[in-house]
Image: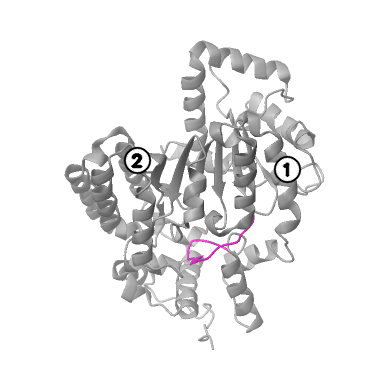
Amino acid sequence: MENSAPKTFCPAPWTTLASSNDGSVQVCCRALHPLKPPTGQTLKFAGQTFAQIWNGPEYRNFRRQMLDGQPTDTCTRCYQEESAGILSRRQRSIKNQRQTRGEQGWAQWLSHLQAETGDTGERPSHVEVRLGSNCNLRCRICAPEFSQPIRRTMEAVIAAGQELPAYYRDNLARVDGRDDLHWQNDYIASLLEIAPSIRSMYFAAGEPLVTPAYQKLVDGLIRSGDARHIQLTVNTNGTTAAREWLERFKAFERTELWISLDGIGKAFEYQRSGAAWDRFERNFEAFTSLGNQLHLRFFPTISLLNVMHLTPLLRWIGKRTSGLGGENLSCQINLLHTPIFLHAQWLPASLVGGLRTSLKEIERDYLYFRTPDGQNVMTKLNALLDLCGQVAPPQVTRDLLYHTQLLDRLYHQELGEYMPETAQVLAALSKPKVDAATPHIAKPS
């Protein structure tokens, strides 16, 4: 292997250790599914040491695929984004490694990996931690495997004899009988064992700031002194800002909060059932009170639900970046991949031009969106708009309408009241009317 890597190569299998929120081993946060041994069962952290996992047959085989230039369905999400002209996680990882190592160091590292043929003496410098599905919200783009409140809600629907969209039904089957506690201690022990090599750590899944297992891990890193050389990133819904967490953040070399913010005001409350906008704004003030000790990154996930609400969301972010500056406050766009019926690509083509105009106005009005970081946001959003206008298959439309109506009734909300622009989009997509195959939705008692 020379200066350039195979087209399918990604540094993650050598630099990253990641978990799914059920304790399975993943290559990274964008992996379509966990690593699997030849038996077909997913590789788990439970009952295994770090050494058994890191240089076990599953990791070795996956690394060899990368070195041989073989595409893998595990990396489908990155391939799809790259085909659409969107900078993928794989491409960002390569860019970061080349910048960190320099061109000569990058070439030497690639040659070293080729010589190892799948085994590696390196330890992960980046760890992505998902410790179960304990959460305090029922977000509409989320699923039972990621949120216990959603899981309980969907189990109640089934118990009441109602139908679920296939996406929820299949997802619920994955968590049947799952116990998050039995594997967490083994995973935390592995992380504390390799803590001296860790330089960055990412928390996601459930809501980390209300989950005791994350607190246990953080306290262990603080006691060992390893927190001082770790840059911590926490993906949070921003609905809690407990003082004890704010104090813990100060122990790390750097702490960044990735705040999942998909809308403002009533649009925020509709998409994230159980959240209150005024409380979110108070928590935002608490986060900013830490000044340079805490970097905030807004992390909107764009779906059919909120694509028509980009203008007020980006203007709200633009005003905050003007007050704090790009050093402490930034934005990164995430594109929804599942469920497919919530893809933004179903947005009618007639609405795309108005959104492009709004993006240009926002870029003109707010300096942040003219910086390199802000330009990345604009580039990704415009690439997304290029994908819009696709015709949704009838089953996709049925699932979309049923999902929306079901959650409206369960959560005692009404789309037209909270997000009227999105309601108009769904009305347009529903013509001609959905046929009788759409199940009847009974009101919850």
For the residue pair 224 and 388, the one nearer the viewer reads as 224
Q: Which mark identifies residue 189?
A: 1
For the residue pair 79 and 258, the one nearer the viewer reads as 258
Q: Is residue 390 visible?
A: no
Q: Is residue 373 left or right of residue 146?
A: left
The structure residue drawn at horizontal position 34% and vertical position 60%, both measured from the top left corner, is 281
Q: Which mark identifies residue 328?
A: 2
Q: Is residue 145 visible?
A: yes
Picture coordinates of residue 375, whole percent (x, y): 30, 37
Q: Which residues are magenta?
A: 132-143
Picture coordinates of residue 343, whole percent (x, y): 44, 56
Q: Is residue 58 left or right of residue 425?
A: right
The structure residue drawn at horizontal position 38% and vertical position 74%, both measured from the top left corner, is 432
Picture coordinates of residue 123, whole percent (x, y): 67, 28
State which quadrant residue 152 falls in: bottom right
Q: Which mark identifies residue 233?
A: none
For the residue pair 249 and 350, the one nearer the viewer reads as 249
Main SS class of the magenta portion in the image: loop
Question: Rounded to the nearest whole Å, what is the CA distance between mark 2 and mark 1?
Answer: 32 Å
Q: Relative to 435, does residue 35 appear above or below in the rendering?
A: above
Q: Looking at numbered disc 2 in the image, what kind of residue is underneath it? A: Asn
For residue 278: magenta? no
Give the quadrant of the N terminus: top right
Q: Is residue 228 left or right of residue 329?
A: right
Give the quadrant of the C terminus: bottom right
Q: Looking at numbered disc 1 in the image, what kind of residue is underneath it? A: Ala
Q: Relative to 145, does residue 408 appear above or below in the rendering?
A: below
